[in-house]
Image (spheres, rainbow, N blue to C red):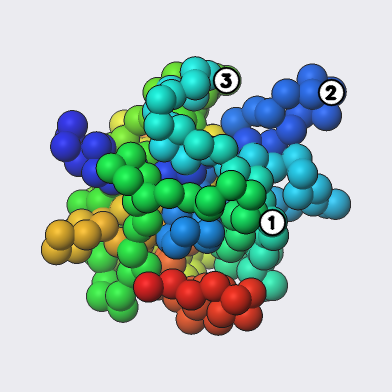
Amino acid sequence: MKSLSQWSVIAWVEIQMLDPDKLTFEHHCGGAVIAERLVLSAAHCFDKQPLQLEHIRLVVGEHRLKMQDKHENRFLAEKVVPHPDFRKSGPHSNDIALIVVSRSGHGVQFNSHVRPICLPDATDSAGRWCAVSGWGFQAEGTESFAPVLRAASVPVLDLATCRKSQVLGGRQQPILDSMICAGVLSGGVDACRGDSGGPLACPAGARWQLAGLVSWGAGCARRQRPGVYTRVASYVRWVLDTAASLGHNID
Ligand code: 4AZ
């Protein structure tokens, strides 16, 4: 678990949002670095309209949430592009957003603390154990974020299992092909509030692939209630086309 968390969290971005009352930047969501100036996150992290770009701050290389870490770097967002067909309710779908990091300074510098994660190939990740990470709530009822970045290993479930009525099937929110369910059915390990937009990273040879983005769930870490992630493989074309239309290439 130690080595897993060490490597899987390297592309993590903390997305902070300005609290207009307190005038402080507060933890808001997670994201993943996919190129020097590109970050992927969940569209639902940006659904408060109007979105004010100057209220968003991106932090890379971070470990302790409330403390200035040696390797952390802050950036502004130049642009946020939520998926044009994002829908939050009935059914919640296309929960993905592409963020362009502002050009200020020299952009995100890659080093042993910050490295981009690969976009996934089309291979189905069902049955693989992947890493979810974030500063989100450590249990469903606790109203506080984790002080240091936490990571957990969760198995990717096949959609048929996830759609069973005793799991997440037959409810208000259908499990679409463009979603991934991951978690142990006995409960106890999961993403929770504050982890949204963060990566579900799967080992692929010597690299990590961004299989999913934390999207939603029925509570957190409950028995028979796996976490639901945006299936990034369903959006690789959209990500590449959107990036290219903004003048960015992804290696
Ligand atoms: C949330 O509220 C949230 N158990 C994120 C992930 C999960 C549940 C809730 C998954 O942002």
Residue at 20% x, 52% y is: 129
- Regarding residue 190, the answer to whether it shows in the image is yes
| Position of residue 79 measured from the top left corner of the image (x, y, whole percent) | 69, 60
Say above or below: 22 vs 99: above
Q: Secondary structure at mark 3?
A: loop
Mark 1, residue position: 78
- The first of marks 2 and 1 along the sequence is 2
Q: Which amino acid, by three-letter code, is at mark 1? A: Glu
User: Is label 1 within 8 A of ligand 1 (CB to nearest ligand atom)?
Assistant: no
Quarter of the image for residue 210 reads bottom left
| Position of residue 3 measured from the top left corner of the image (x, y, whole percent) | 16, 37
Residue at 50% x, 36% y is: 73
Q: CA distance from mark 2 to mark 1?
A: 23 Å
Q: Quadrant of the N terminus?
A: top left
| Left/right of residue 69 with respect to residue 172 in the rendered view | left
Mark 2, residue position: 21
Q: Residues within 10 Å of mark 2 (few under 14, many from 20)?
A: few
Q: In the rendering, which numbered label is found on residue 143?
A: 3
Q: Quadrant of the C terminus?
A: bottom left
Please give the count of numbered marks on the rendered protein: 3
Q: In this rendering, which labeled residue sits more in front, label 2 or label 3?
A: 2
Quarter of the image for residue 26 reads top right
Q: CA distance from mark 1 to mark 3?
A: 31 Å
Q: Which amino acid, by three-letter code, is at mark 3? A: Glu
Q: Nearer the viewer, residue 212 or 106?
A: 106
Q: In this rendering, which labeled residue sits more in front, label 2 or label 1?
A: 1
Mark 1 vs 3: CB contact within 8 A = no
Q: Nearer the viewer, residue 77 or 130?
A: 77
